[in-house]
Image: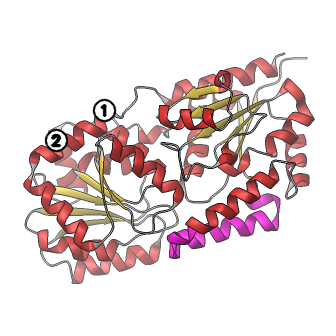
Amino acid sequence: MPPTDPCILILTSSTGGGHDQRAYAFQEWVRRLYGDRVTVHVEHILENSSRLTRFGVWTYNTIQRHAPALHNIYWYIAELFGMMQGRGLGWGGGYFTALLQRWQPHVILSVHDSTNRGYFDVARRMFGDRVCCATYCGEFSGGFGYSRIWISPHVDLFYSRTAEAERHALALGLPAAKARRFQNFLAPHALAPPMDSDARSRFLRDELGLLPDRFTILLATGAVGANRHIAHLETLRPFADRIQVIVICGHNQRLLSRVAAWSENRSGALRTSVKGHSRRVPQLLQAADLVVARGGANLAAEAVFTGCPILFFVRSIMPQERLTVRYLSSKGAALSFSSDRELARAVAGLLDSPDRMRQLREGIAATRASDHPEEFVRALVTRGEELAHS
C-alpha cells in the first residue's frame, strides 16, 4: 500500500479576523508549495460543534462591534469556559470526535486560544503519538490579555510570535522543549515586494487618486467592523492642507456607504481614498506614513512587516489588544490616543517633528524578524509526512 498523503486539520474561530487570516494563510501556502499532495482542512470548530460555543462567538463579535470595553468582563467568562473545556470537551465533543474520525489528521494546528485545551486531549486519546498537536499563538506579549487556555499539556509544538510572548508561555507551564518562535505568519499576498519612492508615488497617484508628496494616514478597521472612522475623519479635517487619508472599511458595507458619503459631502479639502475589503492592505501600508488602528494582532503584524508606524486607538481597549499595544509601544514603534483631542495633538506633533517620525520608523523596523512563512509551513508539513509514512 502506498504511503498516505499527510492531512493537516486547522482549528479556528471567527472571533475577530486574525485567527481566520492565519488559518487560511497556512492553507494557501500549502497549496502553493505542495499542491494536492497535502490535505488541509480549516474547521470553525466553535461555530460548528455546539450551540453554546456558537453563541459565545456571536457574543464576542457583537461586543467587539458595539461595546469593546465589555470584553474586559467577557474575557474572564471565556477564560473560565476554556479552563472547563480543559477537563474534556463538555460542549462539542461528539462533533469533534466525528471530525477526527473523518479526516484522520496527522497534524492538528490550533490558531485560536479556545481550540487547544480539551481538543488536544481528545485527539491524543484517539490517536496517541500518531498525531502532532501544534499551536500558533499570535499574541505580541504576555500579561493581562494573554489567555491561559493557549497552553495545553498535550501540545507538541507551540509557536509564539515574539520572545516576550514566549517567556509568558513558559511561565504558564509550557515546556521549553516544545517552544518555538515565529513572527511573520502572513498570507502570500501580504508579502508584497517593497515599493521604492517612484513606485509609491505612482501607486498613490494612479491607484488611489492621491498626491504623491502628501503625508498619508491609513484608517484601518478589523474584520467585524469596530471603528470610529467618521469621528477620526472629522478630527483630521483641520489638517487638510497637510495630510491625506486612505480609509479601509472591510466587509462593512454600511460603513463604506457612510464614509463615501462623508468624503463626498463633508470632507472639505481633505483628500480621501475610500476602500471596502481589500487584499492590497500591504501596499496601502507601504503607501501610508502612519496607520491608525485598534490593537489587532494581524494588522499590527502586517504593519511591522511593511515598516508602517502605528497610532493605536486605545479607548475601550480589549484585553487581547493590550498585548499588541504594550509590545509595539515599548519598542518605540507606535503611539496611542484615546480621544479626538489626543489624535489631533499626536498628528500635529508628527507633522511638525520629522525626527519623531524617523524614530517611529526606526522603531518599527527594529521589531521586524527575517523569518518567512514557508519555514513554518514546511516544518509542520514535514512532521505530517513523517507521521503519514511511519
Residue 215 lies left or right of residue 60; in this view the side is: left
Give residue 341's position: percent from left, percent from top. 23, 72
**Circle nearer the N terminus (2, 1):** 2
Structural distance between the alpha carbons of marks 2 and 1: 12 Å
What is the three-letter code of the residue carrying label 1?
A: Ala
Residue 211 lies left or right of residue 315; in this view the side is: left
Q: Magenta part of the protein: which range?
A: 46-71
Determine the residue positioned at 42% across, 41% down.
Answer: 190
Q: Quadrant of the C terminus?
A: top right
Give residue 334's position: percent from left, percent from top. 30, 49
Q: Which residue position is annotated with label 2?
A: 358
Q: Is residue 235 above or below residue 164?
A: below
Determine the residue positioned at 74% across, 39% down.
Answer: 152
Q: Is residue 162 visible to us here?
A: no
Determine the residue positioned at 70% across, 27% down.
Answer: 37
The residue lying toward the viewer, choosing from 21 and 369, is 369
Q: Which residue position is annotated with label 1?
A: 366
Res. 58 image quadrant: bottom right
What is the crowding at mark 2: few (fewer than 14 residues within 10 Å), some, or many (at least 20)?
A: few
Q: Which dot marks residue 78?
A: none
